[in-house]
Image (cartoon, helix red, strand yellow):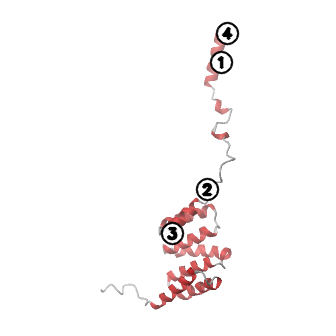
């Protein structure tokens, strides 16, 4: 009888799922020494892609960074710049509108906004932003270069699409 009871107890315990009664090793790991969640990874990678001229990838990564932190000025500025380089001015306009109350009186905003307007051919509005950027920081090389680029853009003739097709 004793052997039968021992056998039944052994079969009963073997068939029982012990994980239902306790936490697994993975769920009780000590994570207090872990670093924070790397939520800036898309932003860091986006800046690298933008610097390398991969504007499509940068656009996607800046968009992911905005999913993590929706009003991050660095991500918004990068998203706007990537959108400009892809000629997605509808997207960059939204980003610049969000940026205006956050960093609207900083040199980075005026340089980027002016460049966006320059790409569209709105030279007068671009000049307004470039001058504001230059007034904020006259020693900034980028602000001086943007004004020079604008000056050079005025000297080139505007041609209608198709003017060179006869050549």
Give the SS element for disc 1.
helix
Q: What separation in Å lies between label 3 and label 2 (alpha carbons)?
A: 21 Å
Residues at marks 2 and 4 touching, judged by CB atoms closer than 8 Å:
no
Across the whole image, how many numbered discs are drawn on residues?
4
Badge 2 marks a residue whose secondary structure is: loop
Q: Quadrant of residue 142?
A: bottom right
* Badge 3: residue crowd in 10 Å (few <14, some 14–19, many ≥20): few
Residue 163, how many percent across, how many down? Answer: 36, 87
Q: Position of residue 152 (x, y in %)?
A: 48, 88
Q: Badge 2: few (under 14), some or many (20 or more) residues near its Cα, within 10 Å?
A: few
Which marked residue is nearer to the observer: mark 2 or mark 4? 2
For the residues bearing labels 3 and 2, Cβ distance under 8 angstroms: no
Pick whichever of labels 3 and 1 is earlier in the sequence. 1
Residue bearing mark 2: 38
Q: Quadrant of the N terminus?
A: top right
Report helix, strand or loop for mark 3.
helix
Q: Which mark is residue 51?
A: 3
């Amino acid at each position: 009888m004793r052997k039968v009871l021992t056998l039944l107890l052994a079969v009963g315990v073997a068939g029982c799922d012990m994980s239902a009664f306790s936490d697994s090793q993975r769920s009780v790991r000590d994570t207090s020494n872990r670093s924070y969640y790397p939520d800036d990874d898309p932003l860091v990678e986006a800046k690298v892609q933008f610097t390398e001229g991969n504007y499509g990838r940068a656009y996607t990564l800046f968009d992911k960074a905005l999913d993590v932190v929706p009003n991050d000025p660095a991500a918004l500025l990068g998203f706007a710049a990537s959108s400009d380089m892809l000629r997605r001015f509808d997207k960059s306009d939204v980003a610049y509108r969000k940026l205006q109350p956050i960093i609207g009186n900083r040199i980075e905003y005026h340089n980027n906004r002016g460049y966006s307007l320059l790409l569209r051919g709105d030279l007068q509005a671009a000049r307004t932003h470039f001058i504001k950027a230059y007034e904020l920081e006259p020693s900034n090389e980028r602000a001086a270069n943007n004004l020079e680029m604008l000056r050079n853009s005025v000297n080139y003739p505007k041609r209608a699409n198709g003017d060179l097709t006869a050549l």
